[in-house]
Amino acid sequence: MNKCKLYLNYAGHCLAKANHAVKGDENISIKFHALFGVIQHPDMGWILFDTGYTERFYKATKNFPNKLYALITKVEITKADELKQQLESNGIHPGDIKHIIISHFHADHIGGLKDFEDATIYCSKLAYDQVLKTSNKFAFAKGILKDLIPQNIDKRLRFIEDCSQTVDDEIFGVKHDLFNDESIYIYPLPGHAAGQIGIIVQTNIAKYFLIADACWNARAFKTDALPNPIVRLFFDSWSDYKESIQKVKLFHEKYPDVIIIPTHCETSTSKLVNPAFNLDAL
Ligand SMILES: [Zn+2]
């Protein structure tokens, strides 16, 4: 098996309510950090998992109806915090990025997509179909800002279902061996968004399961603490969401050593992110 290196950090955040993320929690503001992953693969080079926020969010939400998105979701991102800038500060240039895995097309996951023009973009067909069938006018209500999507994306997309080997999985039904070398496995985690995916990466130190927004707080799969049902309005499918969490829960019970990382769960991510670009810490 080809082992990768993994680096995690934040590219901006939005403010959310604790009692929306977990029903019954306090009515206080919390940060939803936009986590990204940088993977160094021994043969495939640099790979990104999601791309965080960029200042493009402000431009994309300047006018109605997208302005409603910004009014509901207060986003804080500076140029210095953008993924592209963080990489450049560490000698990695946009052209060095050849592969980007997108968990789903919400603005906090694809904000930096336009910065990496040479990268092949991997996502599920279901996730992209959802983008195509959502009208420009109402896309914001599904968390999608079409201005953040590169214009030539059709030429650069590769659908996980088509390009990688499908393997049976005892819990998730199927998983996909992205590069057919067992280095990165893609798992279906639908519900929060149509066709959402997560990845498992094995490093020399541990196995990490980046589950994106399959849940917002790790307590969802540890103690069944679900979000406030009000958030259903923005979800693709509440039943798929609950089913995905149950699968993550089963996985956690069966493989307690795997480090499961929900993108916006600060308790899970704060001990993994690192301002210093260290590829040997995780
Ligand atoms: Zn998110």
Image: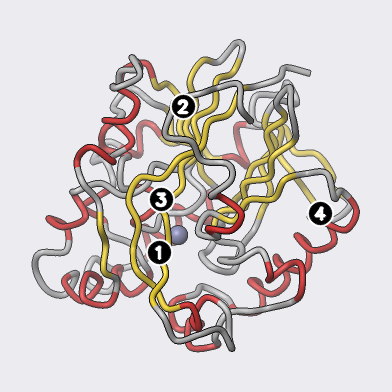
Residue 262 x %, y %? 59, 56
Residue 266 x %, y %? 53, 58
Closer to the observer: label 1 or label 3? 1
Q: Is mark 4 within 8 Å of ligand 1?
A: no
Q: How crowded is mark 3: few (under 14 residues within 10 Å), some or many (20 or more)?
A: many
Q: Of the residues shown, which amino acid type is indicated by label 3? A: His
Residue 141 x %, y %? 33, 75
What residue is at 19 percent from the left and 40 percent from the top? 79
Q: Does the residue labelled 3 lie within 8 Å of ligand 1?
A: yes
Q: Quick one: quadrant of the C terminus? A: top right
In the rendered structure, are the residues bearing label 3 and label 4 in contact, judged by CB atoms less than 8 Å apart? no
What residue is at 55 percent from the left and 60 percent from the top? 265
Residue ranking furthest to the top: 43
Q: Is mark 1 on a helix, strand or loop?
A: strand
Q: How crowded is mark 2: few (under 14 residues within 10 Å), some or many (20 or more)?
A: many
Q: Is mark 3 on a helix, strand or loop?
A: helix
Nearer the N terminus, badge 1 or badge 3? Answer: 1
Nearer the N terminus, badge 4 or badge 2? Answer: 2
Nearer the N terminus, badge 2 or badge 1? Answer: 1
User: What separation in Å lies between label 3 and label 4 (alpha carbons)?
Assistant: 25 Å
Please state which of residues 214 and 219 is positioned toward the viewer in this rendering: 219
Q: Name the residue under label 4.
A: 173
What residue is at 59 percent from the left and 58 percent from the top? 267
User: What separation in Å lies between label 4 and label 1 (alpha carbons)?
Assistant: 33 Å
Q: Is mark 2 within 8 Å of ligand 1?
A: no
Q: In which quarter of the image is ligand 1?
A: bottom left
Q: Residue 31 carries which label?
A: 1
